[in-house]
Amino acid sequence: MRVYIPLLFCLLSLILRAESFTVSYVKGIVDRVTEEGNKTKRSREIHRLSLNDPINYGQYVASGPNSFCELDSTSNLLRIGDQTLIQYLGENIWQILDGSILVCLLSEDTTFSLSSLTGKASLTGPCTFIAQTTSNGGYKVITLSGKTNIVIEDKEQTIPSGRLALVLGQSKDIGDGYDIDLLLLLQSSLLINAFDDLPPTFGKIRLAVYKQQLKLKSRYNLVIGDAPTDKNLQMWVMGKEADKK
Amino acid sequence: MKIFKHILLFTVLLSSLKGQQLDQTTVQRQTTPPEQFLKSSNRENQAIVPSNTGILSPILLKTSNITIFGGLDNKFVYKTNPIFRETNLIDKNGGKAGVWTYTLSGGGMINPIDFNSALVTPILGASWSESVYYNNRKLPGGGEIYDSLETYDTNVYALFMIQHESGINFRIGSSYSMAVNVENNTEDYYEFYPNIGATYKYDQGWGLQGIFDISGGAHYAINNNFGDDSKNHTQALSHWDYTLSYSLLYEIFGVSLSPSYRITTKDYFKDTNQVASTYQREDVMQYISLKADYPFLNYFNFGVKYEHSRRNSNVRPSVVPDYRAHDLSTNLSINYTF
């Protein structure tokens, strides 16, 4: 019996330490999908998410068109955009299969592991970033506030606020960085504006916008699109110039 | 005939407004960088289509740690009461004037210093302006004469802009200003003005933004005695000022419209205006204005502004006149950052 008591304490402390996510906001149709069974016999349970529902390891969260969801834990916050599919793999380990998420890493100690179909990186903050999947199997990371420290297989890079970097799918590398117009992004981002409240780190995001505006030299009439391969990144001309073409 | 009068107004420079001085405590001096420099500019005429991540548009940032800015402003103001006479004297004596002001401004700032919950930006700036007052004055026996008054104003300021994550922008700094009467080549007025302030801008809905501003400071002023020679100086215009203002900002078709109300109290603390002397002077000044700004070609701004101002002083009107004034101004400015 004496042997079991410390073990029980260890187990309890592990459970208490584990990052459990609960739904803190939901709009539209957002489902939690639980898969059970093995490869030959697999069953799926689909549950329509509502406030305070928990998300456990292995479960998927899928959002429909014009549907948004926010998941809260003690040190992180996740906002899930519309038509997005993500899976909670383990403590602070997520996989984004399609769509976009906004992540607020509130604590300095937390390492957030995010993988896509072929890309995988560990991210540390404190910071706020948006991740969006790309066709090459990787994903884009755009830091909105703080500094996102990205580690891919021993390669480390710090992405300051207002910069976009690519977590490349096939080559397991960090792609080129681009400074992004944060003010325009904030005005047009549903991950910021489609929710009733602003993200808890919005004060820091506001400071990042202020800093960027003071350092702004010029703008390009371009929009960054998809990355179909690791070597290609689509750019589109926007505004009047695009209309002429 | 009217055209002839206007031509005369701008070309004939006769005698100066002898025996008349501007009340320098009513002059609004520059203690922060030009508004256009600090304003975050949106892309013009662009339809924003929302998406999950938002529009990802690349930009180019400065690599230098120091930003230099400069600007030129050309303003014409039609003033119903240019030298702030008592209201009932204006109509009798004429007194309306056109004031042409050219302002050259410049400065530099170091990249913001990050203090986690706030960004601190040290800024140094200066401006120099020349104002020419064109005034047609009715003579007691009939007829009118044209007067002109020319002043140079120099301002130098140093301030720390503190942008807090709550959205409040604090500022603390000091400025030195000097006004020179060109006709007599005399330094009519100079002041040292340590000041603090805070601005809070918030979204009010329906595309409206509300802007609260509160500021205060001490004007340590030295000026020529009225009607005396330049060797006789006084500190009587030294005063504390406390200002509260509220503005609305609305953008439509690229034009930003801004109605504003501002109230300032001025407590004088030196020489004849101080407590121990004959009286303690206290002025309350109120301003209501409507401003329209049209920024174009990235660096230019065309503006039109109407302002009604009034002063109520606790001192008898023969010494410090209570006045009302209407100003209608138009300006064209260019601001550039290097």
Image (cartoon, grey):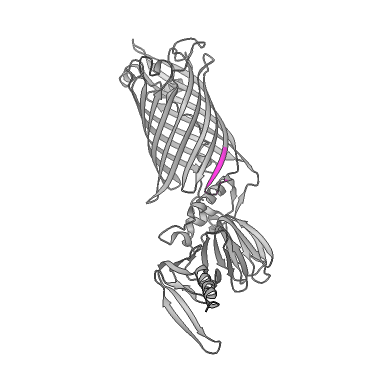
Whole-percent x and y of residue A18? 52, 69
Image: A118 above or below B46 = below
Q: Is residue B316 magenta?
A: no
Question: In percent of the image, x 48 and y 38: which residue is there?
Answer: B302
> Which SS does the magenta portion mostly show?
strand
Question: In percent of the image, x 50 and y 75: which residue is there?
Answer: A60
Question: In percent of the image, x 52 and y 79: which residue is there?
Answer: A1
Residue A23 visible from this viewpoint: yes
Image: A12 above or below A126 = below
Quarter of the figure with residue B319: top left
Left or right of B53, for residue A164: right
Whole-percent x and y of residue B56? 55, 59
Q: Quadrant of the C terminus of chain B?
A: top right
The one of B263 and A6 positioned closer to us in this rendering: A6
Residue B47 visible from this viewpoint: no
Image: B84 above or below A240 = above
Q: Quadrant of the N terminus of chain B?
A: top left
Image: B323 above or below A226 = above
Residue that sits furthest to the left in the current view: B88
Q: Is residue B117 magenta?
A: yes
Left or right of B249, for residue A139: right
The one of B13 and B55 positioned closer to us in this rendering: B55
Whole-percent x and y of residue A80? 48, 67
Residue that sits furthest to the bottom in the current view: A40
Whole-percent x and y of residue B131? 49, 24
Looking at the rendering, the stretch of residues picked out in magenta corresponds to: B114-122
